[in-house]
Image (cartoon, rainbow, N blue to C red):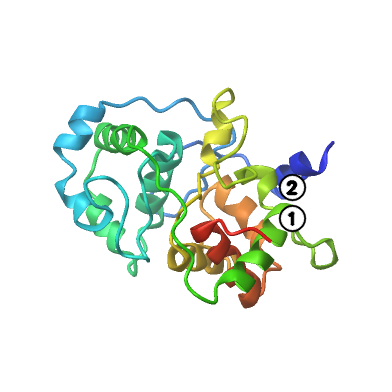
Amino acid sequence: MNNSLLACTFTLAGLGLIAWPGARADVETFMDLRNIAAVQGDAAAGKANSATCAACHMQDGISVVPLFPNLAGQHAEYMYWRMREIQQEARADSPMTALLANLDDTQLRNFSAWYASLPPAQHAEPARGAASHASEGARIWSEGDATRGIPPCQGCHGRKAEGHPLAAEVIRWRMVPILRGQAAAYVTQRLNAYRDGAHTVTSSARMMNGAAANLDDASIEALAKWIETGESK
């Protein structure tokens, strides 16, 4: 097994759980997303009903608020199941909980199809003084850090954060999000949450729990800056 594939799969081996994808219950239910179907939706219908989404994520799917993710060009499968995850977690501290609470499956699919159809975000211009952070982030992204048990991010997310290289052919790899151009503040927030075990509802989240477990604050900051700007070492 090559290092890239190992980086993608090393945490999945320990899941050992039997679950039903998308099951809903009064208690938190684990969702195994390792064998998903392609997500189909009506992009036109998603666009027609996206005014509330656009208030935070903008009409073109590229947010101007650093804490909100860009949705444009993201895999429909990732967005659909991320919304299902938010519904399942029902976290009181997330503004998305109330917004998604009453949306049905068709609406989730339509929104996913709409934003997936838009041109994706590109790397932002690096801020002055950001080069050192980005350089360290590029190193961790491409090489990881074996001495600290940190896998290379590119093994799943692609060499330039463009998503898994097999996503076009293999549906399950569309659960790996495209990260290129996401704001550093958003990436930092998500990596902190994974590292601290805040998200455990899906197999994808648990894989990230393992991948982020040994990242310190400086490494998270460096990775976030690299994802935002794409500056290399």
Mark 1 Cα within 10 Å, few/some/many (few <14, many 20+)? Answer: many
Residue that label 2 marks: 7
* Nearer to the camera, 139 or 150: 139
Q: Whole-Å distance between the Cαs marked 2 and 1?
A: 5 Å
Quadrant of res 13: top right
Q: Amino acid at mark 2?
A: Ala
The image shows residue 225 at horizontal and vertical percentages of 54, 66
Left or right of residue 213, residue 67 in this image: left
Q: Residue at x 70, y 45 (%)?
A: 155
Residue that label 1 marks: 151
Q: Residue at x 32, y 67 (%)?
A: 92
Query: Is residue 7 positioned above or below 65 on the image?
Result: above
Mark 2 Cα within 10 Å, few/some/many (few <14, many 20+)? Answer: many
Q: Residue at x 66, y 74 (%)?
A: 216
Q: Amino acid at mark 1?
A: Pro
* Residue 172 seen anywhere in this rendered image of the structure: yes
Query: Is residue 77 positioned above or below 216 on the image?
Result: above
The image shows residue 170 at horizontal and vertical percentages of 59, 25
- Residue 189 bears which disc, if any? none
